[in-house]
Amino acid sequence: MDRLQVENPIYPLLSLISSMLLLISGLIFVRQFYFPWLLLALCVLYGLFGFLKVLLRSMLFFIPVSLLFFLTSFLFQRNLTTAIQIGGRIMLVSLTALPVLVIPQIKLTRNLNQLRCPRVVTLGMLIAIRFVPVLAAEIRQVRAAMKTRGARMSFTSFSCLYRAFLIPLLMRLISISDTLSLSLETRGFSLSQKETSIYKPVSFTLRDACYACLTAGLIVTMILAYLSGS
Amino acid sequence: MMSIELKRFSVKEISFLAILAALLVLLSATTMPLMTITLYGLRNMANALFYGFFAMIALMKIRKPGAATLLCMFSATVLLLMSPVMFFNNIISALIAELISLLIFKNYRQEKAMILSAGLIIPITLPMTIVFGMLINRQRFSEIVDQSWLILPIIAGTFLLSFTGAFLGRKIGHELKKAGKLS
């Protein structure tokens, strides 16, 4: 996820809200004939705001994934329309998630702190997003240790999975969380809502306002097209 | 009068819940390919074991009202980037599950309360999926539940897997407690 981050993202909260609105409205219009135009419009919008490089990089992953979903759905359901809709939904999810994926997590947290969001939420959010790759690496390590001991990861040998995978993984998890909380507390972090200083405040710029207007315009156009069609 | 005891969370507890949520997201991502099958409740059933298990572990370490909701909220934060529907679905379901359990047992001192709370989270997402499907995807009830003969087995399977996960979590929780890791 770090490879997708850009230096100059859109205002974090705006990205989050606009992504949600675009996704929800996109899901409503997924069956309409103009749905591909929505995907194209999103690509143009991201290109205008300097996300072209990151868009191309992410599409290298998301296009094959959408195709895979399309093919699997077609194989299972034998219905071309449903398969196209599922493939389209995956593309929509990946495209609408892009402005949020490119935000450095710390900026999102700073933004929420500025808006006096409870620290329980911001801390939890930051850790949960940040630790996904760390835990993926931990899982790989536990599996490597299993291989070294000659244990095989299989759902048929549940006792082996339980002893050699689940217990060590949870032990590591508890150790990591203990170390993390100690590290946080020694740096003076607390969950109380008292006044704190934010070193690099995130501000709303003219560029963000333009992005908000264009996104709102896109959603309104979709609604108008939907109303005129029905 | 019956009242639910509310306690504050510490940094240690929040970091534990958040890391558990990250692992939950990672494991539940393995059920992503099921998105291609539009059978009602299948995705919920596939996630039931993971959610039951991790919610139980979370509640065994942090016996405070709101722990399961926070766990689901943190995991949903990651999902928010992919699906806002799942975000609201998870949080509301966890909240309702905890409320039901706490209204019956008042607190998490008894293991029954934790099992009920952890086991109910995913089954509650089943009716919520219908509501969100009708609201957001503009589907009719008959479209969502298109293969009605499969509904009962799927609902039963979701309950079974969710509570199996909770019992498995209890078993591992006891072992970790013996090792002094879950206190």
Image (cartoon, coloured by chain):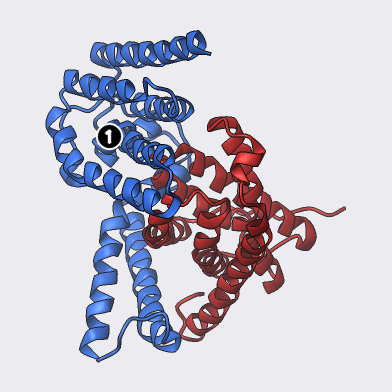
Q: Looking at the picture, how far across and down is residue A14, in whole percent? A: 36, 24
Q: Secondary structure at mark 1?
A: helix
Say which residue appears at 52% left-offset and 65% top-offset: B58
As rendered, which of A9 and B61 lies closer to the eye? A9
**In the depicted structure, whether residue A105 falls above or below residue A153:** above
Relative side of A167 to A132, left or right: right
Residue type, numbered disc 1? Leu
Chain B, which colour? red
Q: Residue furthest right?
A: B1
Say which residue appears at 30% left-offset and 26% top-offset: A39
As rendered, which of A70 and B182 lies closer to the eye? A70
Q: Looking at the picture, how far across and down is residue A182, in whole percent? A: 35, 62
Q: Residue furthest bottom?
A: A150
Say which residue appears at 50% left-offset and 62% top-offset: B46
Relative side of A162 to B116, left or right: left
Chain A, which colour? blue
**In the depicted structure, whether residue A116 falls above or below residue A154:** above
Relative side of A208 to B142, left or right: left
Relative side of B84 to A182, left or right: right
Residue hosting label 1: A98
User: Does any portion of residue B17 appear in the rendered image?
Assistant: yes
User: Does any portion of residue A188 appear in the rendered image?
Assistant: no
The quarter of the picture where residue A156 lies is bottom left
Give the letter of the chain under mark 1.
A
The quarter of the picture where residue B107 lies is bottom right
Q: Looking at the picture, how far across and down is residue A174, in whole percent? A: 39, 70
How many other residues sit within 10 Å of disc 1, few (<14), some (14-19) or many (≥20)?
A: many
As rendered, which of A95 and B6 lies closer to the eye? A95
**In the depicted structure, whether residue B18 falls above or below residue B128:** below
Q: Looking at the picture, how far across and down is residue A117, in whole percent? A: 46, 34
Number of marks = 1
